[in-house]
Image (tube, rainbow, N blue to C red):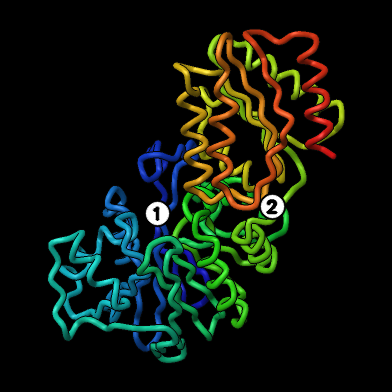
Amino acid sequence: MNNITNDIYYIGASDNDVELFENQYDVPEGMAYNSYVIKDEKIAVLDTIDERLSDAWLSNLKEVLGSDLPDYLIVSHVEPDHSANIKKFIETYPDATVVGNAKTFGLLSQFYDLEINEDKKLVVAEGTNLSLGSHNLTFAMAPMVHWPEVMVTYDEKDKVLFAADAFGKFGANNDGLFIEDKEAAEEWCCEARRYYTNIVGRYGVQVQALLKKAGALDIEIIAPLHGPVLKAEIPFFIDKYNTWSSYATEDEGVTLVYATLHGNTRKAAEYVENILKEKNVKYEMFDLSDCDVAEVIESAFRYDKMILASVTYDAGIMPCMMDALYHFKLKNVQNKKIALIQNGSWAPMSGKIMREQLETLKNVTILDNMVTIKSSMTEENKKELDNLVAEILA
């Protein structure tokens, strides 16, 4: 059994075979689905996990419970990767009370053929307390972090914030369940940032509201629904979430993104890359035909500048670049300085389209100085790219 504290147990499991999370995000290191038990005078189970891991979850639950029976199932989030085993739980433990907010039960009925007797429902709201004995739980609503019914639970005794989808990350918990030092906390950032920016990134205002509530709590442990349990460096994690959710610059640097047809636009991007290397500028470069757009979004959140290069295609723009632009809008990328490079053999249009799409973002500055390449890069184009990089770095 994995003890988080003397009374709190981890009963989640990791899926090392899943390839896509939410059927769209690459998870080469698998995915963790977390669930917890608090054992006190009364026993509370916090969330279930994905149906692919039902057997492991039920086995873990029974091992922790032993001969005891649970009194409550707290539903933090109805998304199926956390609620898929609620019906099995109710069938196994029919006397337990299901705890959720007003929106929880409506969504559950939409997803599942599930009947919960009214006397086995406990509807909670902002600030509702639930005593288990020595553990006093307080509920806080976290709408749109990242669904409307999401809520978090704070355990006053052990100072644990059960954070739902907040503070999660991509990846299985194969390397350990806990983060307990600064080095591990910093290693957490990459996949946690990619998770945040793509899963929750659109809802920065709502995350800021949750952080304000969290700021009033004495938190020593954060227990999310994905990824490791955070048992140290809590201010570090909260600071990262504050940066990401306020759309502030995390690092000065450049996200360099290109869409190429026959390789000439790639050569222009590589020329820019060499300039950035020479100037010791932090950057990440992405070929949109051969990358996970979720990584592009992560980078766009992280750095304060973007350089986009695209060939013209069918009197428009390469579909992979249009898809990236769509994701920029969808995930609320903002507060960026942006430079554009377009390519077109007879009627360059990609720059115009990129500008039109990017102008819909908040607080962006798009350089007027756009470099136009006609088919292949010339010596004059190289001078223009030198000037473009100098201007965006100024």
Q: Determine the residue positioned at 29% across, 61% down.
A: 83
User: Image check: 231 left or right of 163?
Assistant: right
Q: Position of residue 36 (x, y in %)?
A: 41, 68
Q: Is residue 127 left or right of residue 156?
A: left
Q: In the figure, 324 relative to 199: above or below? A: above
On the rendered structure, is 144 left or right of 93? right
Choose top left, top right, bottom left or bottom right for residue 125. bottom left
Asked whether disc 2 touches disc 1, contact meaning CB atoms under 8 Å apart, the reply is no
For residue 67, which quarter of the picture?
bottom left
The percent coordinates of residue 333 (x first, y second) are 58, 48
Residue nearer the viewer, 206 or 125: 206
Query: Which of 319/349 is in front?
Result: 349
Q: Eyeballing the image, is 145 above or below 54?
A: below
Q: How many marks?
A: 2
Q: Give the residue type that dot 1 points to.
A: Ala
From this view, report whether residue 128 is shown above or below residue 171: below
- The reply, left or right, for residue 344 in relation to residue 170 is right
Determine the image quadrant of residue 48: bottom left
**Mark 2 surroundings within 10 Å by alpha-carbon count, few (fewer than 14), some (14 through 19), many (20 or more):** few
Q: Which residue is mark 1?
A: 13
Secondary element at tag 2: helix
Residue type, label 2: Glu
Per the image, the residue denoted by label 2 is 186
Task: Using the image as rendered, state which of residue 358 and residue 261 is in the foreground.
Answer: 358
Q: Of marks 2 and 1, which one's residue comes earlier in the chain?
A: 1
Q: Position of residue 68 (x, y in %)?
A: 29, 78
Percent across and percent down for residue 373 are 67, 15
Separation (CA) of disc 2 from disc 1: 23 Å
**Residue 162 numbered tag:** none
